[in-house]
């Protein structure tokens, strides 16, 4: 029986008198209990289509020139607020892409989950609390029952995503819309979330509309798929048929877009550029009235790192394993214990003024380019800021020329330097972040999850770019990621971290082809979609 029926749906945005058609005559339907995946790159219209179902697009900016959205026989386009409230969060729910921005930072976990219960089921606060505890169990968060008065920022990424799932499932909806629910999660957590969704689907009999750019997930999770490009569905059908025999050029392009290849070998004779010995970052746990230190969180607990020019050390592990803390400690952005030698010079003990000349040579590219680029600064100012700080470039015109050269080198048009970050796509913003680091001609770069939120085809482009820059400028990389396919394409050596320790290390070939520890094998099984205990079927 058809639950959702979309016919000839169009979505038009009107901004400052300009019109843009984001979705152009899309049609598909979902049966009760079915999983339909909608795939495509950023800007293809996937999320706009999903938001249209629940009429969550901003009005009057967004309109529907054509189309019908029928949910269990009820027309959603033009429905009254009362009619929409009876559906949204009750019979149809949505899990949004980024839980940290979707959860209210001022409300506790309990308040956010119970809100839908109180609104739609008219439960008392006592009843809502009991149901909230049940939902936490259902979402695999039984260990958070004592923390329901905590706030979202105290939870890990996987826990926040499960809270979003608990909220979405509060009223046992007939339709669950999951918009990129696993994008920024570790591979093992990703597998757990998908397994959980599939189990809940079977238990509750709900339909799932699953939006993603990760095709490997679709193959394992959905029965049917729609491929979107530029607001159009270019191909649709059963997953096996579409993936095994794609007819459209765009589908073929998507399926061939995984990061491939390996980095060029490190030239023989390259001496270490950066070394650490028994590096430790311990955060004190203070308790009692006098706030005495009772224990430590050992975020990094005695790690040795050696990286040479033209070499990439891949650092992998789940959230909380200490990957980013290790990178920030090496850059002396957080305090640590243990020697850090850069080009033969000991960095521990150097003050801010002594470190400043070395900052130019030791750069970082952060995970979220949108969060790390100031929305109030133009691209020219963002990339050129380091040049001013380090006295490079001389005049304004000379600095703009260096900025333009850096932009061209990372595949951006120099003529766009006076625009602002919001005017660029996610992949372009990541290129801007890379240009900001590279304009200073560094020798060592920490790359902290630089591809995690990007489409697969854009990931492949960024990997190619980073490999080229490494060879062109003799760079040493510390590459932090939870995406093992990207790590394999980038790294010469790999370190597997867990709970602040390195549980396994070696050449990329050795780690990927013959992992020695159970933890490394589990990571690889989840990441590379091998048959394992994490499989969702």
Image (tube, rainbow, N blue to C red):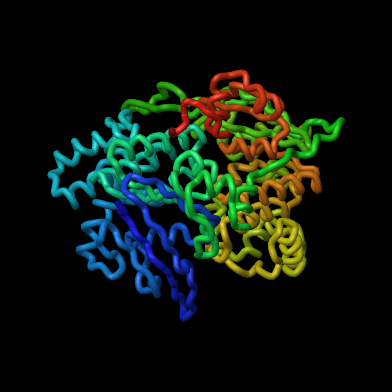
- Relative height, residue 426 to residue 255 (above, below): below
**Left of 384 or right of it: where is 481?**
left
User: Which image quadrant for residue 62?
Assistant: bottom left
- Relative height, residue 57 to residue 175 (above, below): below
Residue sitting at 72 percent across and 29 percent down?
A: 306
- Relative height, residue 48 to residue 33 (above, below): below
Whether residue 328 is visible, yes or no, is no
Residue sitting at 65 percent across and 32 percent down?
A: 349
**Left of 164 or right of it: where is 219?**
right
User: Which image quadrant for residue 2?
Assistant: bottom left
Which of the pair 309/264 is nearer the observer? 264
* Image coordinates for residue 181, horizontal then vertical, percent: 43, 45
* Image coordinates for residue 220, horizontal then vertical, percent: 49, 39
Residue sitting at 27 percent across and 37 percent down?
A: 135
Q: How many discs appear? A: 0
Which of the pair 393/528 is nearer the observer? 528
- Relative height, residue 412 to residue 494 (above, below): below
* Image coordinates for residue 61, horizontal then vertical, percent: 40, 73
Quadrant placement of the C terminus: top left
**Left of 18 or right of it: where is 329?**
right
Which of the pair 371/346 is nearer the observer? 371
Residue sitting at 25 percent across and 44 percent down?
A: 172
Whether residue 509 is visible, yes or no, is yes
User: Which image quadrant for residue 412?
Assistant: bottom right
Report the residue that reaches farthest toward the bottom. 17
């Amino acid at each position: 029986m058809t639950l959702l029926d979309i016919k000839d749906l169009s979505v038009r945005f009107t901004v400052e008198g300009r019109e843009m058609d984001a979705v152009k005559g899309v049609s598909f339907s979902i049966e009760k209990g079915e999983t339909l995946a909608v795939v495509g790159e950023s800007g293809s219209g996937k999320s706009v289509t999903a938001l249209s179902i629940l009429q969550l697009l901003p009005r009057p900016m967004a309109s529907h020139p054509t189309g019908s959205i029928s949910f269990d026989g009820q027309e959603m386009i033009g429905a009254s607020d009362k009619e929409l409230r009876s559906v949204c969060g009750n019979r149809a729910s949505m899990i949004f892409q980024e839980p940290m921005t979707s959860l209210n930072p001022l409300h506790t976990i309990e308040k956010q989950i119970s809100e839908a219960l109180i609104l739609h089921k008219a439960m008392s606060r006592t009843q809502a609390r009991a149901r909230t505890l049940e939902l936490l169990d259902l979402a695999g968060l039984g260990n958070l029952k004592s923390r329901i008065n905590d706030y979202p920022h105290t939870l890990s990424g996987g826990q926040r995503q499960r809270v979003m799932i608990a909220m979405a499932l509060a009223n046992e909806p007939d339709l669950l819309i999951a918009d990129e629910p696993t994008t920024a999660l570790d591979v093992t957590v990703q597998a757990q979330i998908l397994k959980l969704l599939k189990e809940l689907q079977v238990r509750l009999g709900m339909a799932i509309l699953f939006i993603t750019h990760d095709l490997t997930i679709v193959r394992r999770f959905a029965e049917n798929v729609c491929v979107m490009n530029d607001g159009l569905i270019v191909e649709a059908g059963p997953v096996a048929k579409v993936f095994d025999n794609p007819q459209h050029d765009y589908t073929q392009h998507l399926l061939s877009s995984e990061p491939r290849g390996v980095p060029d070998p490190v030239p023989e004779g390259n001496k270490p550029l950066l070394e650490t010995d028994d590096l430790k970052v311990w955060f004190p746990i203070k308790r009692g009235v006098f706030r005495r230190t009772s224990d430590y969180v050992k975020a990094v607990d005695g790690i040795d790192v050696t990286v040479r020019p033209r070499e990439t050390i891949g650092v992998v592990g789940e959230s909380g394993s200490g990957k980013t803390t290790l990178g920030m400690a090496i850059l002396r952005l957080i305090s640590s214990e243990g020697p850090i030698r850069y080009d033969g010079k000991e960095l521990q003990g150097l003050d801010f003024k002594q470190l400043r000349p070395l900052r130019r040579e030791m750069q970082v590219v952060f995970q979220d380019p949108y969060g790390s680029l100031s929305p109030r600064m133009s691209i020219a100012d963002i990339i050129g800021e380091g040049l001013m700080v380090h006295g490079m470039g001389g005049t304004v015109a000379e600095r703009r020329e260096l900025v333009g050269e850096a932009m061209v080198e990372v595949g951006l048009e120099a003529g766009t330097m006076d625009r602002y970050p919001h005017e660029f796509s996610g992949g372009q913003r990541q290129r801007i972040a890379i240009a900001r680091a590279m304009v200073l001609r560094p020798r060592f770069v920490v790359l902290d999850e630089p591809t995690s939120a990007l489409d697969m085809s854009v990931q492949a482009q960024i990997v190619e770019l980073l490999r080229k820059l490494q060879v062109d400028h003799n760079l040493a990389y510390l590459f932090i990621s939870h995406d093992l396919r990207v790590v394999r394409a980038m790294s010469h050596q790999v370190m597997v971290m867990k709970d602040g320790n390195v549980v396994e290390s070696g050449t990329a070939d050795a780690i990927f082809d013959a992992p020695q520890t159970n933890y490394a094998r589990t990571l690889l099984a989840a990441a590379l979609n091998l048959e394992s205990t994490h499989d969702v079927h």
